[in-house]
Amino acid sequence: MSAPLVVAARVEARALVANAVRLAFFERYGEPPSPDDRLWELDPFDRLGLVCDVELKLGVAFRDEDIEFLETPDDLIERGVAVLLGGER
């Protein structure tokens, strides 16, 4: 696997994750997230709903693969990279 291809997939996965979070936040709260917004400060039920919205958007973005929120955002991005590379990693 060429390094430029892996880097490109990582950049694409990071962009897809960021856009999914921004879109889900905007759809739920009617405004884009600010730099001061923190997921852990949300009501637990709101947080669960937002996470589910993001998971649905990522399932579509990552070609309907089973995307789960893992331990860290980097884990999620790495999973996205693997999907975008066709599971070759």
Image (spheres, rainbow, N blue to C red):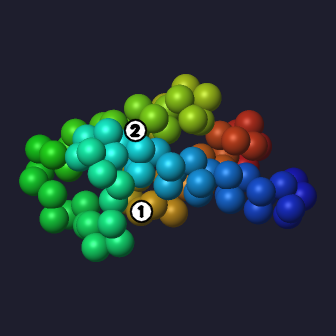
In the structure shown, which secondary structural element does the residue marked by tag 2 occupy? Answer: helix
Q: Residue furthest right?
A: 2
Residue 73 x/y as whole percent: 45, 61
Q: Nearer the viewer, mark 1 or mark 2?
A: 2
Q: Residues within 10 Å of mark 2 (few under 14, many from 20)?
A: many
Query: Which residue is at the front of the view, 16 or 35?
Result: 35
Q: Is residue 50 visible?
A: no
Q: Is residue 61 above or below residue 71?
A: above
Query: Which residue is at the front of the view, 33 or 71?
Result: 33
Between disc 1 and disc 2, whose residue precedes? 2
Q: CA–CA distance between discs 1 and 2?
A: 14 Å
Hey, which quadrant is residue 50 in on the image? top left
Hey, which quadrant is residue 53 in on the image? top left
Query: Which residue is at the front of the view, 1 or 57?
Result: 57
Residue 43 lies left or right of residue 73; in this view the side is left
Circle 2 residue: 55
Q: How many marks?
A: 2
Residue 68 x/y as whole percent: 42, 42
